[in-house]
């Protein structure tokens, strides 16, 4: 089965990437593939990831359902308090890497293995000119009301992250709901914004400063995606 849209203009995409260090590719996957991924991601029992004073935290779906209203209010207050002082994030996640390492055979785990194989890697190398990528990190992510990701550049000294990516799986979204991927300049201004078009692949060099805007309380949906990095071992 063919996963990637064979009609992509790789030369044009490559020129855009070389010019800007990033590119948003519409209709990257074949329709049957992206629809299957969309259905699979809708079945996830989401965990919440965020930070507190001691570092990164994850609350499982069961733990989230066990919180009462007061505990949920306190959790949100703690997340916002740290965001005023330091880097912070709050969004829902499910690790595709962990699923693949456990040997699971559901669609998202199989897709993770496919991403690590040559068909996907070769296409990304061709578009970006980044030839030393040979590993992938992937997680399913979902931004719902109150979720956000503050400005950062994805660089980690101990990892060989070369490229970041977002595979967008949201059928319907509005820009005024938030949840957009914004790129920033040294002075903090927004230089470009990527809307999460269904079946689009956002691809950008690491390091590059960016953030995901706060999803408004009145948003009528969730912004779902597969996100991660392409890594040089």
Image (cartoon, rainbow, N blue to C red):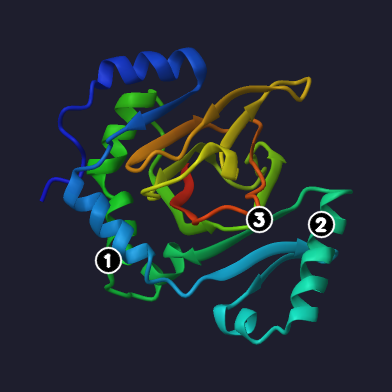
Question: Who is closer to the viewer here, 151 or 114?
Answer: 151
Residue 183's x, y, as percent?
61, 28
Residue 187's x, y, as percent?
78, 20
Q: Which residue is mark 1?
A: 107
At 82% from the left and 51% from the top, the residue drawn is 83
Residue 117's x, y, as percent?
27, 49
Of labels 3 and 1, the one closer to you: 3
The quarter of the picture where residue 150 lies is top right
- Mark 3 secondary-structure assignment: loop
Residues at marks 2 and 3 touching, judged by CB atoms closer than 8 Å: no
Residue 13's x, y, as percent?
33, 20
Of labels 2 and 3, the one closer to you: 3
Residue 43: tell me if it is visible: yes
- Mark 1 secondary-structure assignment: helix
Q: CA distance from mark 2 to mark 3?
A: 15 Å
Q: Which mark is residue 37?
A: none
Q: Which residue is mark 2?
A: 80
Question: Who is closer to the viewer here, 200 or 2?
Answer: 200
Q: CA distance from mark 1 to mark 2?
A: 35 Å
At 59% from the left and 46% from the top, the residue drawn is 159
Q: Which residue is mark 3?
A: 217
Mark 2 nearby-residue class (10 Å; few <14, some 14–19, many ≥20):
some
Residues at marks 3 and 1 touching, judged by CB atoms closer than 8 Å: no
* Label whose residue precedes the other's in the sequence (2 or 3): 2
- Mark 2 secondary-structure assignment: helix
């Amino acid at each position: 089965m063919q996963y990637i849209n064979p009609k992509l203009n790789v030369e044009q995409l490559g020129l855009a990437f070389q010019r800007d260090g990033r590119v948003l590719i519409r209709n990257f996957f074949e329709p049957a593939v992206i629809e299957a991924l969309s259905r699979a991601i809708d079945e996830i029992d989401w965990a919440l990831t965020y930070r507190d004073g001691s570092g990164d935290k994850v609350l499982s779906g069961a733990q989230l359902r066990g919180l009462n209203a007061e505990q949920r209010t306190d959790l949100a207050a703690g997340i916002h308090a740290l965001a005023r002082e330091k880097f912070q994030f709050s969004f829902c996640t499910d690790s595709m890497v962990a699923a693949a390492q456990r040997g699971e055979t559901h669609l998202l785990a199989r897709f993770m293995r496919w991403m690590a194989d040559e068909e996907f890697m070769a296409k990304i190398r061709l578009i970006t000119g980044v030839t030393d990528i040979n590993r992938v990190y992937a997680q399913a992510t979902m931004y719902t009301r109150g979720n956000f990701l503050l400005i950062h550049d994805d660089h980690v000294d101990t990892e060989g992250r070369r490229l970041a990516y977002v595979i967008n799986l949201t059928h319907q979204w509005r820009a005024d709901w938030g949840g957009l991927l914004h790129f920033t300049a040294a002075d903090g201004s927004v230089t470009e914004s990527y809307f999460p078009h269904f079946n689009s692949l956002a691809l950008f060099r690491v390091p590059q400063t960016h953030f995901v805007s706060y999803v408004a309380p009145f948003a009528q949906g969730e912004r779902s995606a597969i996100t991660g990095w392409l890594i040089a071992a």
